[in-house]
C-alpha cells in the first residue's frame, strides 16, 4: 500500500467508497473486499427509472465527468437523472494495486481483472446498494466504452440505452500492441522493480516515456500541426509536454496503470458467445449510439463502425475533434456540444 | 568502431564505398573522410541524361531497392536508366557512428548530420565521381522523400523529376515526437550507456521496444486487423513480432539509428527560404509526383497533399496499401504495380 496524493479526495471530489464484498474474478483471482469509488448526482426517481451509469477510462476517474460532462445544460443533467459514476477497479480510487490494505493482493500481487469483472461489480453495486435494476443509459469513453458494451451484451434486460464513445466491444490487435508499448515503458524502468517500488516517483522515467506515447497516439497529427495546445494555455510544444502530459501521468501509480492496461487489452464481448462477435453484439437490445471520434488513431471510426453494423437498431454518430482520442477530455469547444446533442437525442428515444 | 555483421557485403550486396573527402556539416561538425556506400545499375548514356538517384530511408539501405524496386519490368529499369542508390550518412553502410575508423567522430562523438548534408554529399559524388550534372529523377521513400525534396529545392536545375514517396518536405511536429519516442527506447536502455556500448546486443531490450513502436505506428490498424502478417509467412502475431520486426531492428546499430533519427526529425526545406515553406517549395522546377501511402499513420496523405499544393505543376498520386508506412517494403502484391505505374508515367513526362 502506497500513499499517493493524486488518488485522494483533495484531487477527486465528492466520492465515497462502497464495499460490494468479495468479488470472484473471471481469471480466477479474488478481491476479498472490493471497494468501488462512486460519485452520484441528482435523485433517483420513485420509479427508479432515471438512473444513468457512467464508466471510466484508462487513467481516468469520475472527476473529468464531473468537470466537463455533467451539470445543468448538459444531457447528463442531475435535475432529470440520477447519475452514478463508478470508478473502474484498478483506477486508483476503487480497489487497486497501490491502495488495497490487503497485502495478499497489493502491488505486484494484484489479481488480473477483466472488463467483465467491473461490470459484474457495478451491477451488484447498483442492485444491492441503490436498488437499481434497469439503467436508462450506460455511457463511457474508451475503456468506459468497453464496459458499456459489456453491460449491453451481458445484461441486455438492464440496459435501455448505450452510448459507447471512442471505444470498441472487441479490442483490436493494433490496440493490444499499442497498450503493450505503454506497459513496456513502465516495465523497462528499473525503478518499477517488478511492481515492488515504494513510490511512483521511482518510476518517473518510465511514466514520462509512457506519457510521450500518449503524445503521438493519443492526440492526432492535426493536433500537433495546428498547435492545438496553444488553446490549452501553453506557449510551446515542449511546455505542453512537460507542463501537462508528463505531470498528468507521472503522478499516477504504475501498477494501477498496468492493471487497467491488462484489462483494456482483453476487452471482448465475444467471450459471451464463444468468440462470435456478431452473435454477441446481436444480443444487444439497448438503443445504442456508437460514437467514435473522427481523428482517433487507435479506436478509429472504421473499427467502431464495423461493430455498429452488428448491433440491432444502432446508429453511428461520429464525433469530430482534432484532439483525437484524448478529445475525451472535452477541451475542444466543439466537443461537448456534439456529445450533448447525441446523448440528449438518445435519451429522448423510447426504449425498453 | 564496432563490427556488426548486418552492415556487411554478405547482407548488403554489390555496393562499394566511395570517398567524397572532407564534408563540412550544416551544424558545424565535420566528417574528415565521408564515405558513401553506393550501388549502381545500368549504364550512363553518352549524353549523361539517363541518371536516376535513389535515396534511402531510416534503417534502410539500397538493398530493399535492389530486391523490390529495380529490374526488368519495373519503371526503374537498368536497361534504360543508370540508377545510383546512395546510402544515407549514418545508415551503417556509409560513414556512420559505428563504422567510422576515425575515433574522433565514432560512436557518441558522431557529429549531427542533416538531410541537407546528405544531399550536398550526393551532389558532390554524382558530379565528381560519375560526371552527372542533371538527374532524370530523384526518388526515395520516407527519409528518402526528405532527401528528394531537399534535392528539388536546393538544386532545382539539377532535378528534372522528383518522386517523394511517403514522406514530407517539412517534418511535422507529430513526426518529430514519434521519432523521439523511438529514440527514447534506445536511450532508456542501460546497455546504451550514453552511446558507448561495445555491441548492439547490449541494447537489445531498447531495440526490441523500438521495434514494437514500429509495430503500432509503422503499420496500420487494418494491417493487424486483417492479419496481413499471415501473407508474410507467419502463423501468429507474436511470431511476426519475434520473427520479423524484432530481429529486423535488434541487428541494427543504436547510434546509427539515433543519427538518422536526429536528421529525420529536422528535415525541412524551408531552411532555404527563411522558414517559408511555400517559398521553398515554389522553387521546385522538377516535375513532381507526391506519393503518400493512404494508410500511413505518421506521414498521412493530408500532410503530403498540403505540400503538394505548394509545388508548381505537381501531382498527388496516392498509393493504397494497408501495410501503412512500412508498405515501403513492397511486400503487398498491390504495392509495386502502383509505384511502377506512377514512376513510369513520371519518367515519360517531358521535363527540363
Image (cartoon, coloured by chain):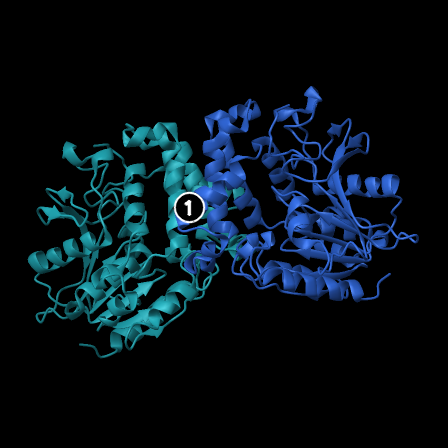
Chain colours: A blue, B cyan
Would residue B103 be seen by someone viewing this image from the given angle? yes
Query: On the picture, is B226 further left or further right than B79?
Result: right
Residue B13 coordinates in the image, percent (x, y) = 24, 48
Q: Is residue A24 left or right of residue B260?
A: right
Asked where in the image residue B65 lies, by quadrant, the reply is: bottom left
Tell me the quarter of the image containing the C terminus of chain A.
bottom right
Q: Specify the farthest residue to the top.
A: A103
- Quadrant in the picture for residue A284: bottom right
The spot of residue B257 in percent (x, y) is 31, 42
Q: Chain of mark 1?
A: A
Q: Nearer the viewer, residue B13 or A254?
A: A254
Horizontal side of residue B174 vs A255, given as left or right: left
Taking depth in this image into account, of B172 and A179 the one nearest to the observer is: B172
Write the residue at 54% across / 35% down.
A251
Placement of B79 over or under A296, stated as above or below = below
When the figure is inspected, residue B155 is found, relative to residue A53, above or below; the finding is below
Which quadrant of the rendered structure holds the N terminus of chain A? top right
Q: Is residue B99 left or right of residue A236?
A: left
Outermost residue on the right side: it is A46
Q: Dot 1 lies on which element? A: helix
- Res. A309 visible in picture: no
List the residue tagged with mark 1. Answer: A239
Q: Nearer the viewer, residue A189 or A172?
A: A189
Query: Where does residue A315 sit, x and y in percent of width and height?
Result: 71, 66
Amino acid at each position: 500500500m502506497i500513499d499517493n496524493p493524486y488518488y485522494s479526495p483533495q484531487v477527486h471530489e465528492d466520492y465515497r467508497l462502497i464495499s460490494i464484498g468479495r468479488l470472484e474474478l473471471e481469471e480466477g483471482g479474488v478481491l476479498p473486499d472490493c471497494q468501488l469509488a462512486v460519485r452520484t448526482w441528482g435523485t433517483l426517481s420513485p420509479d427508479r427509472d432515471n438512473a444513468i451509469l457512467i464508466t471510466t477510462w484508462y487513467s481516468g476517474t469520475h472527476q473529468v465527468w464531473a468537470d466537463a460532462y455533467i451539470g445543468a445544460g448538459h444531457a447528463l443533467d442531475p435535475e432529470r437523472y440520477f447519475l452514478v459514476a463508478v470508478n473502474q477497479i484498478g483506477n486508483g480510487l476503487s480497489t487497486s494495486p497501490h491502495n488495497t490494505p490487503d497485502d495478499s493482493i497489493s502491488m505486484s500481487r494484484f489479481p488480473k481483472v477483466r472488463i467483465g469483472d467491473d461490470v459484474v461489480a457495478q451491477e451488484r453495486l447498483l442492485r444491492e446498494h441503490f436498488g437499481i435494476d434497469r439503467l436508462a443509459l450506460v455511457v463511457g469513453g474508451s475503456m468506459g466504452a468497453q464496459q458499456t458494451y459489456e453491460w449491453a451484451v451481458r445484461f441486455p434486460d438492464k440496459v435501455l440505452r448505450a452510448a459507447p464513445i471512442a471505444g470498441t466491444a472487441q479490442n483490436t490487435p493494433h490496440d493490444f500492441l499499442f497498450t503493450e508499448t505503454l506497459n513496456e515503458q513502465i516495465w523497462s524502468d528499473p525503478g518499477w522493480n517488478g511492481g515492488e517500488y515504494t513510490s511512483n516517483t521511482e518510476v518517473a522515467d518510465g511514466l514520462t516515456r509512457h506519457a510521450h506515447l500518449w503524445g503521438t497516439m493519443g492526440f492526432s497529427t492535426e493536433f500537433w500541426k495546428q498547435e492545438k495546445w496553444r488553446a490549452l494555455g501553453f506557449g510551446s510544444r515542449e511546455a505542453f509536454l512537460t507542463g501537462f502530459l508528463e505531470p498528468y501521468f507521472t503522478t499516477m501509480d504504475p501498477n494501477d496503470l498496468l492493471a487497467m492496461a491488462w484489462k483494456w487489452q482483453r476487452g471482448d464481448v465475444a467471450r459471451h458467445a464463444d468468440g462470435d462477435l456478431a452473435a454477441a453484439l446481436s444480443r444487444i437490445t439497448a438503443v445504442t449510439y456508437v460514437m467514435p471520434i473522427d481523428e482517433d488513431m487507435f479506436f478509429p471510426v472504421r473499427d467502431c463502425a464495423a461493430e455498429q453494423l452488428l448491433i440491432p437498431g444502432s446508429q453511428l454518430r461520429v464525433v469530430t475533434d482534432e484532439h483525437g482520442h484524448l478529445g475525451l477530455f472535452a477541451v475542444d469547444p466543439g466537443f461537448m456540444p456534439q456529445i450533448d446533442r447525441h446523448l440528449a437525442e438518445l435519451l429522448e428515444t423510447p426504449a425498453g
